[in-house]
Image (cartoon, rainbow, N blue to C red):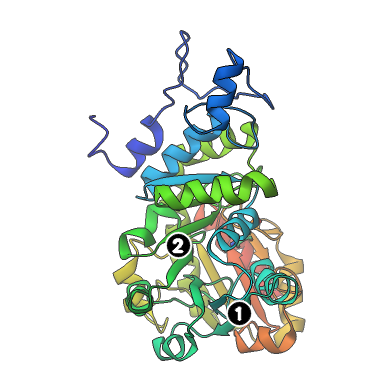
C-alpha cells in the first residue's frame, strides 16, 4: 500500500514478486520450466477453460514473466502488460491483435528499420493490410490520410533515428474523432521520461532490449495497454504465434528496471552535454537533439516528456566519407547498432539500422548518408568528449 504514492525509482525497486512460496526471496526466482503440473484433470480443464487463474505452459505465461508484466504496467501507468521475445514481437503482436486483412494503418514515415519493413512488406504484400506512411509531425497529413477502414495510427516519438517528435495529444485528438486506436513505440523515452498512455494513447510498445534492460545482454519487448487488449494480445495472438519472453530474460529486464531512473538521468545529462559540444564544433553540419533550443520541436519536447533522452543524431561536414572516417576513429565509443546500453554506441543508420528502407523513403525521412546516431552511455562525460574530439580531428 505504501508504494501507491512512491516515486519511480522506489517502485522500480520495491515492487516485488508475490509468488506463493514459503521461501521469501528478494529477487524474483527464475521459473525455468516449460510446463506446469496440474493437481487433477479437473484443475487442468478449468485452467484451459479460463475458469481458474494459474499457469499451464510457459508460452502462455510464466511466474517470472508475470512479475515483469506487473511492474512495467505500473511504471508505464497502464492497466496490464505482456512481455515478448523482442521489441519486434511486441510490435507484430500488437498489430495482429488490432488489425486484419482489409484494414488500413497510418504510420509515421520515420520508424526503426525493421518496423518499417514489417509495415511496408509483410503487412502490405503478404497480409493485405494497407499502410500509408506520412510525416505525422504535421497533423494535417494525419487528417488527410485517414480513411473509412483506418484501424490504427502508429508512430515513435522521438523517431529513430532523426529524433523528430510527434505531438501525442494532437494525434490522439484526431484519432478519437474517428474511433481509431493509437499505438506509440516509447523505446527512446522509456516510462521514466514519457507516458503516452496518460496522454490518451491506447497501446505502448517497447523494445525492452534497449534502456529497460540497459546492459546490452538481452533481447525482449513489452506491450502495455488496457486489460482487455492485453488479454486478447496474449490469448488470440501470442499464444499461437509464439514470440514469448523466456523466464531467464524476464529476470534480466526486471533487474534492468531497478536502475532505470538512475541510468536515464545520466544518459540525458551526457546527451545534452555532447549535443551542445557537437553543435558548436566546426566539423559538424547539424545536430539534432530535442533538448537543444535549435530543435524545431524543442517546446513540444518540454511539454510531453520529462527529459530529452539519451540519443543524439548529427551530420558531419563532408558527407559519407567524413562520417565513415569518424566512426572508424572512435576508441571508447562502440561501433555497434542497438541503443540504451551503459556503453556509448555509435552507428550509421543509412548502411546499418535503416539499410533495408529504400533510398527514396530513407531520404524522405531525413536519413541522409552523412547522418550518424549516437546512443550516449553512462561513462564519465569527459572520456566520451575526449574520444569524440579525437575522432572528429581525423575526419
Ligand atoms: C525504436 C525501436 N523499436 C523497436 C525495435 C525493435 O526491437 P528488438 O530489437 O528488441 O526487436 C528497435 C530496435 O532497434 C527500435 O530501435
Q: In the rendered view, would you say 289 is above or below 141?
A: above
User: Is the CB of the residue bearing disc 1 within 8 angstroms of ligand 1?
Assistant: no
Residue at horizontal 49%, vertical 37%?
68
Front residue (pair 330, 137)? 137
Residue 311, image x, y percentages: 52, 65
What is the number of the mark on residue 67? Answer: none
In the picture provided, is 176 more to the left or to the right than 145? left
Asked whether the viewer can see residue 351, the reply is: yes
Closer to the camera in the image, 148 or 153? 148
The answer to whether the residues at label 1 and label 2 have Cβ atoms under 8 Å apart is: no
In this rendered view, identify the residue nearer to me: 177 or 108: 177
Residue holding disc 1? 131
Q: Nearer the viewer, residue 298 or 393?
A: 298
Q: Where residue 309 is drawn, which disc sits there?
A: 2
Residue 1 location (% of width, % of height): 24, 29
Where ligand 1 lies, by image quadrant?
A: bottom right
Residue occupying the point 67% across, 25% down: 35
The answer to whether one can see residue 395 in this image is no
Number of numbered discs: 2
Q: Quadrant of residue 348?
A: bottom right
| Helix, strand or loop under label 1 | strand
Question: In the picture, which quadrant includes the C terminus?
Answer: bottom right
Amino acid at each position: 500500500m505504501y508504494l501507491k504514492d512512491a516515486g519511480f525509482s522506489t517502485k522500480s525497486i520495491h515492487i516485488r514478486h508475490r509468488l506463493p512460496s514459503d521461501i521469501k526471496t528478494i529477487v524474483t526466482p527464475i521459473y525455468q520450466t516449460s510446463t506446469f503440473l496440474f493437481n487433477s484433470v479437473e484443475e487442468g480443464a478449468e485452467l484451459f477453460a479460463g475458469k481458474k487463474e494459474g499457469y499451464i505452459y510457459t508460452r502462455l505465461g510464466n511466474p517470472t514473466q508475470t512479475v515483469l508484466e506487473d511492474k512495467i504496467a505500473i511504471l508505464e501507468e497502464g492497466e496490464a502488460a505482456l512481455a515478448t521475445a523482442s521489441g519486434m514481437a511486441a510490435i507484430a503482436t500488437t498489430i495482429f491483435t488490432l488489425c486484419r486483412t482489409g484494414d488500413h494503418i497510418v504510420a509515421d514515415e520515420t520508424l526503426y528499420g525493421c518496423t518499417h519493413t514489417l509495415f511496408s512488406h509483410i503487412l502490405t504484400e503478404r497480409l493485405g493490410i494497407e499502410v500509408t506512411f506520412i510525416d505525422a509531425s504535421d497533423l494535417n497529413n494525419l487528417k488527410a490520410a485517414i480513411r473509412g477502414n483506418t484501424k490504427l495510427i502508429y508512430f515513435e516519438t522521438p523517431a529513430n533515428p532523426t529524433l523528430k517528435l510527434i505531438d501525442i495529444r494532437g494525434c490522439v485528438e484526431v484519432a478519437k474523432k474517428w474511433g481509431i486506436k493509437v499505438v506509440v513505440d516509447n523505446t527512446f523515452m522509456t516510462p521514466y521520461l514519457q507516458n503516452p498512455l496518460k496522454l490518451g494513447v491506447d497501446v505502448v510498445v517497447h523494445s525492452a532490449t534497449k534502456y529497460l534492460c540497459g546492459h546490452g545482454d538481452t533481447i525482449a519487448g513489452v506491450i502495455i495497454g488496457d486489460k482487455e487488449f492485453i488479454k486478447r494480445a496474449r490469448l488470440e495472438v501470442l499464444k499461437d504465434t509464439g514470440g514469448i519472453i523466456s523466464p531467464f530474460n524476464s529476470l534480466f529486464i526486471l533487474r534492468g528496471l531497478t536502475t532505470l531512473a538512475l541510468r536515464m538521468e545520466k544518459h540525458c545529462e551526457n546527451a545534452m552535454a555532447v549535443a551542445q559540444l557537437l553543435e558548436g564544433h566546426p566539423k559538424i553540419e547539424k545536430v539534432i537533439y530535442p533538448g537543444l533550443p535549435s530543435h524545431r520541436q524543442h517546446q513540444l519536447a518540454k511539454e510531453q516528456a520529462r527529459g530529452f533522452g539519451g540519443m543524439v543524431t548529427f551530420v558531419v561536414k563532408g558527407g559519407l566519407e567524413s562520417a565513415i572516417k569518424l566512426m572508424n576513429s572512435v576508441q571508447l565509443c562502440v561501433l555497434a547498432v542497438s541503443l540504451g546500453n551503459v556503453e556509448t554506441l555509435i552507428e550509421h543508420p543509412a548502411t546499418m539500422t535503416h539499410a533495408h528502407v529504400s533510398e527514396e523513403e530513407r531520404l524522405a525521412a531525413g536519413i541522409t548518408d552523412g547522418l550518424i546516431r549516437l546512443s550516449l552511455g553512462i561513462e564519465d562525460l569527459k572520456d566520451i568528449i575526449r574520444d569524440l574530439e579525437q575522432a572528429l580531428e581525423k575526419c
